[in-house]
Image (cartoon, grey):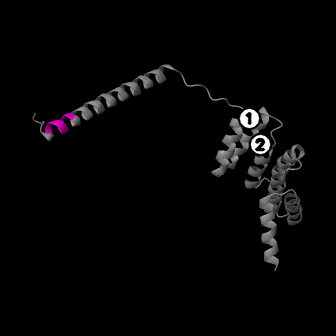
Amino acid sequence: MRSKPAFLIYGSCLLAVVLFLSFSVNAWAQEKAATKSRAAKTPAKPVKKDADYWFNKGALVSTYGNNKAAVQYFQKAITLDSNFSRAYFSQGVSYGQLGQYPKAIAQINMALKMEPQNGMYYYGRGRVYLMWGDKAKAADDFKKAAELGDEDALNYLDYIDQGKK
């Protein structure tokens, strides 16, 4: 019995692979087109614009330095949830970045009324006091934040102590 030449065996295998791939790619393209068609017929679900949505939007724009818009977005979050302490705090930080120190302190104080054991809030208020030029109040807030375990406050106080040596 004669064996088939190698090029016929390999050629047949190669042809089978090419045909398989062409059918697979074609099936994939058809499925992709069908998915697009279904997506075009199905309207997108509306985004739920709750307090978290506006808070996240404010946090994003403040990250890029747009504190004026951040203040407005945080206000929308506060309007939807008047107990949203992080929104008050973040709005206060944004006011501080804008140089509106009395508003900044007032908003951070609102957050502190809701969460008096939040060291980050004391640290943030201390930073605002520092920018405002009130080093004594800033130091008090940094110490309180450190007592509550805020790592940034601990690092800052350690940095200040090293500068005195």
In percent of the image, x 71 and y 32: which residue is there?
50
The count of marks equals 2
Q: Residue furthest bottom?
A: 165
Q: Hey, which quadrant is residue 151 in on the image?
A: bottom right
Name the residue beneath numbered marker 1.
Answer: 51
Q: Position of residue 152 (x, y in %)?
A: 77, 60
For badge 1, the amino acid type reads Ala
Dot 1 alpha-carbon crowd within 10 angstroms: few under 14, some 14 to 19, many 20 or more: many
Q: Classify residue 4 as left or right of residue 36.
A: left
Q: Position of residue 123 (x, y in %)?
A: 81, 57
**Which quarter shows the C terminus?**
bottom right
Q: Hey, which quadrant is residue 125 in on the image?
A: bottom right
Q: Nearer the viewer, residue 82 or 18?
A: 18
Question: Which SS class for mark 2?
Answer: helix
For badge 2, the amino acid type reads Ala
Question: Which SS class for mark 1?
Answer: helix
Q: Hey, which quadrant is residue 162 in on the image?
A: bottom right
Q: Classify residue 13 as left or right of residue 117.
A: left
In percent of the image, x 19 and y 34: which residue is there?
12
Dot 2 alpha-carbon crowd within 10 angstroms: few under 14, some 14 to 19, many 20 or more: many
Q: Classify residue 32 as left or right of residue 49.
A: left
Name the residue beneath numbered marker 2.
Answer: 87
In percent of the image, x 22 and y 35: which residue is there?
13
In percent of the image, x 55 and y 25: which residue is there?
44
Q: Residue furthest front?
A: 1
Q: Nearer the viewer, residue 116 or 67?
A: 116
**Which quarter shows the N terminus?**
top left
Tell me, yes or no, whether the two marked residues, 1 and 2, touch with CB atoms within 8 Å.
yes
Q: Position of residue 47 (x, y in %)?
A: 63, 29
User: Magenta segment, which residues?
Assistant: 7-12
Q: Nearer the viewer, residue 159 or 67?
A: 159
